[in-house]
Image: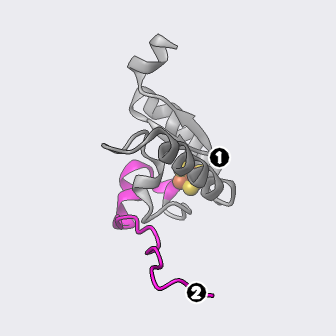
């Protein structure tokens, strides 16, 4: 039996591919191109459960990314400016790191 009330698939806003090139020219083949909000540390109004689920989905994309090593190196170079999911790891904002 099919429901008449199907939930629409979650749509993530698209980000132009050249954005990856602004962060590092080595990330142009990144698996996350066009999926930017999926990797953000937080999205305003998002529940903790949805945030956790989103992070895990992002980690899954990172697991099949061909530039994961370059991404990790870029996150290291950016330091505290790299927040959210980078190379499959969650990088927290600096103020939260101090309180943990
Ligand atoms: S490892 Fe993850 S965050 Fe980094 S470029 Fe690839 S998909 Fe994006």
Question: Is 94 drawn above or below residue 3 in the view shown?
Answer: above
The residue identified by callout 2 is: 2
- Residue at screen point 48% across, 29% down: 92
Q: Position of residue 96 (x, y in %)?
A: 43, 20
Which residue range is magenta in the image? 1-27
Image mark for residue 69:
1
Q: Position of residue 99 (x, y in %)?
A: 46, 11
- Residue at screen point 48% across, 18% down: 97
Q: Main secondary structure of the magenta part?
A: loop
Along the polypeptide, which appears first: circle 1 or circle 2?
2
Q: Is residue 63 left or right of residue 84?
A: right
Specify whether tag 2 is near ligand 1 (CB below 8 Å). Answer: no
Image mark for residue 33:
none
- Residue at screen point 39% across, 32% down: 81
- Name the residue nearer the viewer: 97 or 75: 97
- Name the residue nearer the viewer: 34 or 18: 34
Classify mark 2: helix, strand or loop. Answer: loop
**CA–CA distance in space, label 1 to label 2:** 44 Å
Q: How is the image coloured?
A: one colour
Q: Is residue 16 left or right of residue 66?
A: left
Within 10 Å of disc 1 (Cα), the crowding (few <14, some 14-19, many 20+) is few
The single residue placed furthest to the front in the displayed view is 1
- Name the residue nearer the viewer: 2 or 94: 2
Q: Position of residue 15 (x, y in %)?
A: 35, 64
Callout 1–callout 2 Cβ contact below 8 Å: no
Within 10 Å of disc 2 (Cα), the crowding (few <14, some 14-19, many 20+) is few
Q: Is 6 one of the magenta-colored residues?
A: yes
């Amino acid at each position: 039996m099919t429901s008449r009330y199907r939930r629409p698939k979650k749509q993530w806003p698209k980000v132009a591919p050249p954005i990856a090139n602004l962060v590092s020219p080595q990330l142009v083949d990144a698996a996350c191109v066009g999926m930017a909000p999926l990797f953000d540390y937080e999205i305003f109004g998002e529940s903790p459960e949805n945030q956790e689920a989103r992070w895990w989905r992002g980690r899954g994309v990172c697991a099949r990314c061909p530039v994961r090593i370059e991404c990790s190196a870029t996150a290291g170079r950016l330091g505290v400016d790299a927040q959210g999911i980078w190379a499959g790891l969650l990088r927290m904002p600096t103020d939260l790191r101090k309180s943990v």
